[in-house]
Image (tube, rainbow, N blue to C red):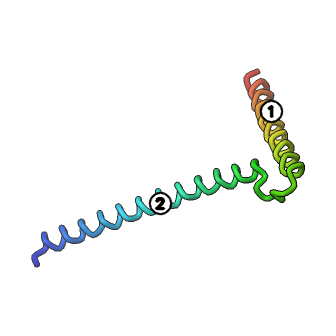
Amino acid sequence: MNESDKDRERRRTALRDIERAVEQSETIAGSTIGRMADNARRHLAAEDADPDDAIEVWGRRVGRTIGLIVFVVLAVYLVLTLSARWSG
């Protein structure tokens, strides 16, 4: 094997390693985001409540939905208030 063959082989190996790293990082990021979305969906659906107690399930769903709405409203209010102060 001469020098150019060694360089080609190293380049092929490096490119293969880079491709493998990119594939694995996309899988990790995708699975993390998917897992977080699934956890949020299960939390808002009150899947941790006793399924035989409909009042508890619906109470948790309503409470968690109201909490989410209040959080979004407060976040928007904070952004608008801070942007008004920064703009003048």
Residue drawn at the location 47% of the way across and 56% of the way down: 26
Q: Is residue 15 above or below residue 75?
A: below
* Labels 1 & 2 near each other (Cβ < 8 A): no
* Residue 36: percent from left, percent from top: 65, 54
Q: Is residue 48 above or below residue 76?
A: below
* Residue 70: percent from left, percent from top: 83, 37
Q: Nearer the viewer, residue 7 or 57?
A: 57
Tag 2: amino acid: Ser
Most extreme residue toward the left, as rendered? 2
Quadrant position of the N terminus in the picture: bottom left
Q: Quadrant of residue 9?
A: bottom left
Q: Nearer the viewer, residue 17 or 62?
A: 62
Mark 2 secondary-structure assignment: helix
What is the distance, in whole Å, between disc 1 and disc 2 at their CAs?
34 Å
> Is the residue marked by circle 1 packed among few (<14), some (14-19), or many (20+) residues within 10 Å?
few
Q: Quadrant of residue 18?
A: bottom left
Residue drawn at the location 10% of the way across and 76% of the way down: 2
Tag 1: amino acid: Val
Mark 1 secondary-structure assignment: helix
Q: Is residue 42 left or right of residue 7?
A: right
Quadrant position of the C terminus in the picture: top right
Q: Is residue 87 above or below residue 31?
A: above
Q: Is residue 24 left or right of residue 65?
A: left
* Residue 73: percent from left, percent from top: 80, 32
Residue drawn at the location 75% of the way across and 52% of the way down: 43
Residue drawn at the location 81% of the way across and 46% of the way down: 61
Q: Is residue 32 left or right of residue 13?
A: right
Task: Identify the disc placed on residue 73.
Answer: 1
Q: Quadrant of residue 76?
A: top right
Report the residue marked by disc 2.
25
* Residue 39: percent from left, percent from top: 69, 55
